[in-house]
Amino acid sequence: MTLNLEMEYEENLDFDYEELAKKVIEAALDYEGCPYETEINLVLTGNEEIQQTNREFRNIDRVTDVLSFPMLDFTAPADFSVAEEDDTCFHPESGELILGDIMICIPRMQEQAESYGHGQIREFAFLIAHSMLHLMGYDHMEPEEAKEMERKQEEILASLGITR
């Protein structure tokens, strides 16, 4: 797995966010049975940058905690057979499946960790797990979809010993 990490936010975090991101990404991929080596792009950013991206791509002019940009258009969540039909989603040099991009707003992540009463490690890991499910075709627009995503997120984090 290749993780392309871009740190746009100037404040240092007090945990190894790159190692944690890799662990959660691998756990999510294993949980969903992804048969490919993958490439993920992760951008850690601030309020202004994520608000601008949210406005540009979703027409929502506000700060959000995380944005996910899937590369694949899954017909069913985690049905990776769709990748075989579209070879443009594989990196031409590495052969890895490019799942997409994740953008996390560090100040928002820190605020949420405090307001939910758990640490930044748990909140960061949650946002990665949440985004990975989006990159694998899951959504939470309907109540049943939201319940399924919540269950999967908690199971992925529990497999790593990251609990509330």
Image (spheres, grey):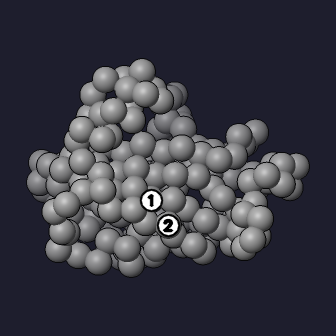
Residue 159 placement: quadrant: bottom left
Which numbered disc, 1 or 2, marks the residue that appears first in the sequence?
2
Res 16 quadrant in image: bottom left
Direction right: furthest residue: 85
Task: Indicate the position of residue 123 as horizontal and vertical percent values.
Answer: 27, 58
Q: Nearer the viewer, residue 55 or 68?
A: 55
Q: CA distance from mark 1 to mark 2?
A: 6 Å
Identified at 72% across, 63% down, the residue is 91
Q: Considering the numbered disc 1 on the image, is that residue within a helix, a strand or a loop?
A: strand
Q: Residue at x 75, y 60 (%)?
A: 90
| Residue 163, numbered circle | none
Q: Indicate the amino acid at tag 1.
A: Leu
On-image quarter of the C terminus = bottom left
| Tag 2 residue | 4
Task: Using the rendered view, name the quadrant where residue 74 is placed.
Answer: top right
**Amino acid under disc 2:** Asn
Residue that appears at 19% across and 69% down: 13
- Decide if residue 1 is on the left or right side of residue 44: right
Residue 33 visible in the shown view: no
Q: State the SS at label 2.
A: strand
| Quadrant for the N terminus in the image | bottom right
Picture coordinates of residue 130, whole percent (x, y): 44, 51
Query: Is 99 placed above or below 122 here?
Result: above
Where residue 71 appears, x then y in whole percent?
Answer: 65, 47
The residue that label 1 is drawn on is 42
Q: Are marks 1 and 2 in contact (CB under 8 Å)?
A: yes
Q: Residues within 10 Å of mark 1 (few under 14, many from 20)?
A: many
Q: Nearer the viewer, residue 55 or 110?
A: 55
Characterize the local packing of mark 2: few (<14), some (14-19) or many (20 or more) Cα atoms within 10 angstroms: few
Say whether residue 59 is visible: yes
User: Residue at horizontal 43%, vertical 66%?
Assistant: 5
Q: Could you say where residue 98 lies in the image, as x and y percent from the top left?
A: 66, 59
